[in-house]
Amino acid sequence: MKKSRYHLEFKLFFRSSSSWIGIIILLITGMAGLYFGKTFIAKQQAVIEKAATLQKKNTLNNIDHFGKDIGLLFFHNKFTLANAPQNWAPFANGQRDINPYLISVTMLGLEGQLYDTDINNPVSLLLGNMDLSFVYIFLFPLVIIAFTYNLLSEQQESGIWSLLRAQTNQSFQVIWQKFLVRAVVIFAVALLLLFIAMLYLELPQDLTLVSVAVLIILYLTFWFAISIFFISLGKSSNFNASALIAVWVLLCIVIPASFNLFLSRTYPIPEALQNVINQREGYHEKWDMAKDVTMKPFFKHYPQLKKYPFPEKKTFSWYWYYAMQQMGDDQAAASRLAVEKKLASRQYFTNVFAFFFPTIQTQLGVNKMAGSDLDTHLGFQQAVRKYHEQIRLHFYPAIFLNQSVNDTDIKDYKLEKYNRQEVPTIWINMLSVSVITIMVIGATVFNLKRFNY
Amino acid sequence: MSNRISTIAKQTFKAAFNNRATLSLTLLLGLSLCLATYVGWQNFKMQNNQRLHYKALVRAQWLAKPDKHPHRMAHYGYLAFREKHELSFFDFGIESFAGVSIFLEAHKQNTVNFSEAGFTNGMLSFGEISVAMVLQLLVPLLIFFLGYNSISAERESGTLKILLCQDVSWKQLLWGKTIGIISICLSIFIPLILLTILLWASLSHWQVSMDSALRLLLLVLTYSVYFFIISAITVLVSAFARSSKSALITLLACWIFFMVIMPRITQAVGVKIYPSPSKIEFADAIAAEVHQQGDSHDPNDPHYTAIKDSLLKAYAVDDVKKLPFNYGGYIMAEGEKITSKIYSKHQSELNKIFEKQNSITTVTGFLNPYLSLKNISMALTASDFNTFVDFQHQAETYRYQLAQKMNKLQIEKISNIAPGEEEKPLAISKTNWAEQPDFNYHFKKLGAVMANGLLALSALAFWLFVAVILLQCSPKWIKTI
């Protein structure tokens, strides 16, 4: 008896054209999101491949042009590190459009090179990327709202509800069944899209897949909970539709957007501009100063380099030049750390704030898993710092001793790829979405109890 | 006739404010708008003051540099900061996504770095709240809530028949309802505009420029037109819909499709159709062309050998050291001329590609009034793509002029004979530095802005036209019962 009732509910649901429209919209936008997300990342991958060949070509060209003067060669020659996209990056493009994914640096001061952006169309950045995570976070909730907002109110408005109540005292069961049917369909569509993504993006079946799937299911459950909460208020269809859309607008647009403004107001980062100025002054002023001013702190920073004789009397030497460049970075160290500290407090504040808002929490969680978040980019920047340091220390002796370029292994330097060391976890994100969902469900149960008596 | 329209409009206005839900919603939106205005204004002041502070610092440091070789100064270079237009507190546009500072030095064109977006953690994908954002996105939603049942409720309660029997025409009813809804919007919009004018005037230290005043006037006008279009659409949907419920659902679906989904898709399509080169490809193409035309860093380059030979011939000397001016400076000036010309050509080609990418979104304005208004609003508040490109252009012009100024000083004032390896480097007096003026960005005049935004403007005009025509002619097809 019960089974056949579910069967009938499914039949009823699929008979309505609006159900199909909702499902088809999700599938089409989901596919479009997958397509555009993958194209976006595929382009970055192609550029990284191209950069690898250019790296070789440019090094050979530079040796050809400047090979006679080793100091000049390293003044021009660039070394590239690429932030290779993770498997999941096409799923959530995140910040990969804004932050550069290829950083090419010479052996000169790093602070003057590290923050160079890619060339971007700012309008595209403003309007944002279309990827599958957008569909899950923004569009699924809307379809959930469309499917459920009038579950009870429609029955009430058409007069069926009072008939039903007169005939059975399990009238809520009917609504519950209708609700379950819609939930099953939405979850099925969500998992189907995830399955398609798995095949299309060749995602490995690992913990990341499970984490993302769980987070998304929790997020969708949250929206079902919100929806059923409004149903439980027993208001009209129009009220439900308006209120649910208002909640969606608040959670998906107004609150995060206001938060952004608040964040940039509370934690402004003028230190970034100060950093540029510090680096520039720190290096350039040394030209007009005694060589000691540069060399003393330089040898203090790198005592191991003291053993290479410094040509004191020469007006200009590459030795001095590279040491001056290093002074730019050294004098910018404080402002650099200040920027890092500000970013960390922004990050901390965002995480605290996100705990109360599942939309933000889910977006951050998905970006984190996809390696397209700010943290990954900062990790990449740190890797560039390390790489730059390692290259400098490797080639300094050859430059300081004015050796021949052919005695160095510069030709062996290829484009390096940065890969995040550890796989992140998003337990906190899952927990916070679950807690909020449970609270909403609690409020609903409370409402329903009042309703019944 | 107009009397009846105003009666209906008044009635709609009063009825809306008698409804407590509407009243509170409208008040809430009004309050959040005032808050957005205030915070936007504060943010503007803070960010712009930072930039002005560093601009002054850069200038002072430039002037304080001691006597030195002019080429050292050319490499010391200049830092330019992108100033905000005083109206950009109204609409942030691409402000947060475009870089803020650019380092201008000889031989090298750098990127504009440190956008606010680079400092945020994915939160910006939700957008930023600004007055413009509330007016463009949320006020239409309010209009939909206010007007979805404007006609359909009359039909459902049976008053529609009575109204039409009392010699009220459909046209009067539609216009009256539309005007009534707009007046509700204006009751929040007008105080907001007054607040905006006040804050804007305080930002420009109570000395408002004609250009900005006109910009603001146009902003008020275009937003009013936008509200009219949205209100007319709402009333029409309500008139054509079978029930209030279906009117509401239709309007909400339209809102989501046109304002949330469509902008992303059109831009993604634009990027797909007109792919732009990556930075390395861009740089490689420039390097290849520079190499082809003449590379001043290459001692065997034919272009520079030819220059050298002709100079030696003209001055009848056998060594460049015997030339009456600084040969190195001359060659660098030539190199700067060639590379910067090539760079500018590639940069303008790149900007053309970006414009083409954006054109898809602009043209879609004919399907979507939201997009056309968004474009106009960004252009009027100088927070759009064109202003950013213009900044890049002015910065590059300044960079070129600075480099050439230093080359000229070198050619004229630096001896042609290089000092020995252990001698003091050549230098010129620091008094020369003041000759290089400070970098000041000049915003485009309104005329040029309007010429650029013609397509978006005509899209909005098109929508206005369609709305009026529909209000006038659609009664033929509307069913009364």
Image (cartoon, grey):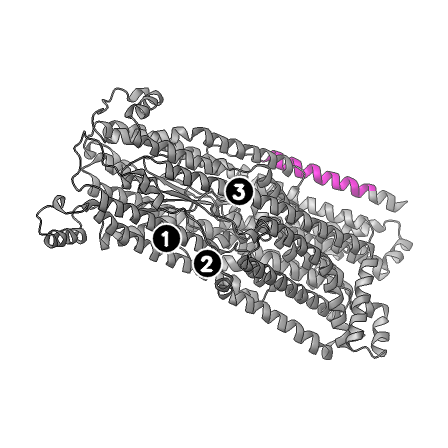
Q: CA distance from mark 1 to mark 3?
A: 25 Å
Horizontal side of residue B94 vs A242, given as left or right: left
Prevalent SS, magenta region: helix
Part of the protein shown in magenta: A426-446
The tag on residue A284 is none
Say which label, 2 or 1, has the lower sequence index.
2
Residue at (30%, 20%) from the top-left corner?
Answer: A304
Residue at (70%, 39%) from the top-left corner?
Answer: A436
Secondary structure type for disc 3: helix
Say which label, 2 or 3, has the lower sequence index.
3
Q: Amino acid at mark 2?
A: Lys
Q: Which residue is mark 1?
A: B397
Identify the subunit bearing mark 1. B
Horizontal side of residue A248 vs B374, given as left or right: right
User: Do circles 1 and 3 both sit on a common chain?
Assistant: yes
Horizontal side of residue A162 vs B24, given as left or right: right
Q: Which residue is mark 3?
A: B49
| Residue B350 lies in quadrant | bottom left
Q: Which residue is mark 2?
A: B272
Give neighbour class at mark 3: few <14, some 14-19, many 20+ (Cα, 10 Å).
Answer: some
| Residue A215 shows in the view | no
Q: Mark 2 or 1, which is nearer the eye?
A: 1
Q: Along the line of sight, which residue is nearer the eye, B255 or A173?
A: B255
